[in-house]
Amino acid sequence: MKQESARSIKSGQANTRVQSLSFAELPHQSRLFLEYLHDPSAVKEYYPNVTPSPLDVGNFASEVLANYKTDRERLCDALTEINQKIGASAKTIENIGFLRSGDTVAVVTGQQAGLFTGPLYTIYKAVSAIKLADELRESGTKAVPVFWIASEDHDFDEVAEVYLADKNGELTRSQYKPANYTQNISVGDVRLDASIAAFINDVFEKLAPTEFSAQWRDLLKEAYFDGIGFGEAFAKALAALFANYGLVVIDPLNEKVKQLASPIYREAIQNADEIVAAICDQNRSLEAGGFQSQVLVEDDYFPLFWHDDQGRRTALRRVGDGVYQVKGGKREFTTGELEKIASNEPQRFSPGVMLRGVVQDYLLPTICYFGGAAEIAYFAQNSAAYQTLKRPVTPVFHRQSFTVVESRQRRTLEKFGWNLSTLFAGKEQAIIAAVERVLSPDMSRLFDDVEEKINAELNRLEDSLSASDVTLAANLATRRRKINYHITTLRKKALMGEVSKDVTIRRQIDDLFNSLLPNGGLQERTLNVFSFINKHSFGFIDLLYNSVDLNDKGHRIIYL
């Protein structure tokens, strides 16, 4: 684990300490992702325009600008409309003005519209894009940060929950669904109802009140209210959080954006079979290289989704030569019919995951994209779609990844002599380790002594049996394993019994896991940013921005 010196925070908070942990030390990381981080050039076959560091991507600007054909004025008019509607800051509007210039590129990231902005990684994506845009401008490349809201996605249950730390530090889950919800419509089209006000109040009742609570309650009530679209509410919250940083938001459901996307939709329809064949070839290449495909793409796959008269989003599938059918329905289209609809009613379509990046980077002069590990994996697949449509393949970088350790958790880690990696073995192992180190070291030493003596005697017996009867020696080996298993089980029960007598230690360990590994995964995948804003003010956003190190490919641990 690499450690850095303390750094100051914009808002005047105390200095922080930041450590870096290699993703190779984190559980459940894919081989492709780890190899991409370790040596991007080794997987260049799947990432043609990969660069070692985001800070090197400025060299890609000339290729992006040469291939960018979308009408900037129309795009920026749409962006102005979207961002003014959500109450974006003057700095955001200024950045849209910069984007009108033909020599400006976009540093892009994006995420589904999550309740109250969703898990922390959404915020980490935004600060990554903002930081790189700032760094590029300082080095002479004109760039602005843009956040693509994946508002067209239709899995509402996936985004309609929020996890926060309650009054007791316990993880609390709150889920919202309006009474008039229609299944499978795009999440951006879901309309909040009057129940959202009571929902916000219920969420706040679970939390410890602080001097900052009223401020962020007001922010949420200004963003989430009766009648507003779920995507727009998300955008308003994001705009408020990043008002000082000029983050530009784009919503692909916007009518003007849809009109701008019409040509790339038509091109994708015309080349659908070639796109699917190229992706399937890419998948086979990945598998031959020992990697797994992130997204299943079968021969009948179609790169666009269909939106029906009720706004429900449904996959299309190839059912014959140039003939496509709505999945689970009877309606069929020819290629020519789909092209005509894409020209006249582009709002009927939205890209699937294999085409989303292409559409996004057709609309925006994208110099790079910040994504999570899963997105990096599927960019290895969809690079084939870029190439089929003769588009430059956008470089993708892993967003900054953080675990925020507050002072209470830091003291507990120090008490037990642990770090974040210690917790990956699981809560039970952590409890046993804590008891052995702090609560009952004498009992632990007793078990060590007993195990050592038993094994010494068994060794002596084995030596004797080996000399007289080899089969008995083999039988002893089997019984030794059983003896050691029973001693280990007894040890575990005894130590767990000790911790049950000490409420303080158990509470401290529960707090560690609730705060640092909620639901058994990294903090950033579960906790919402307002858990920290409630305790540390909106200066927490500044803290994150100042903790970004674009040259660091590890998981960064921030100690408050």
Image: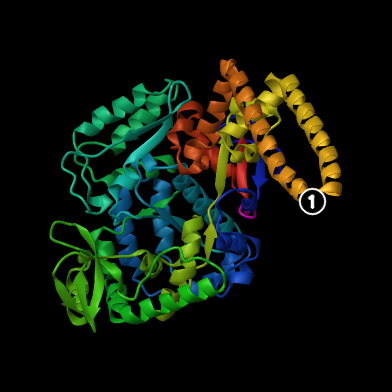
Question: Amino acid under label 1?
Answer: Val
Nearer-the-camera pick, 206 or 484: 484
In the picture as drawn, the residue positioned furthest to the bottom comes out as: 321
Tell whether position 551 is magenta. yes
Residue 302, picture quadrant: bottom left
Residue that badge 1 annotates:
470
Residue 410 in sight: no
Is residue 172 found left or right of 323 in the rendered image? right
Q: Residue at x 64, y 36 (%)?
A: 8
Question: Would you say residue 149 sits in the magenta stretch?
Answer: no
Q: Nearer the viewer, residue 49 or 470?
A: 470
Vertical arrangement, residue 494 with respect to residue 556, above or below: above
Q: The residue tagged with tag 1: helix, strand or loop?
A: helix
Location of residue 70 in the rendering, given as x and y in whole percent from the top left corner: 35, 72
Q: Which of 119 and 215 lies nearest the eye of the viewer?
A: 119
Residue 215 is situated, as x and y percent measured from the top left of the image, at 39, 28
Q: Residues within 10 Å of mark 1 (few under 14, many from 20)?
A: few
Q: Which quadrant holds the N terminus? A: top right
Name the spot of residue 411 as percent of width and height, x first.
65, 25
Picture quarter containing residue 495? top right
Where does the image place residue 461, in percent across and percent down from the top left? 82, 39
Residue drawn at x 51%, y 71% is 287
Which coloring applies here? rainbow
| Majority SS type along the magenta span | loop
Give the residues in magenta: 549-553
Q: Does 438 appear above or below 362?
A: above
Q: Is residue 489 left or right of residue 143?
A: right
The residue under the point 60% across, 36% down is: 9
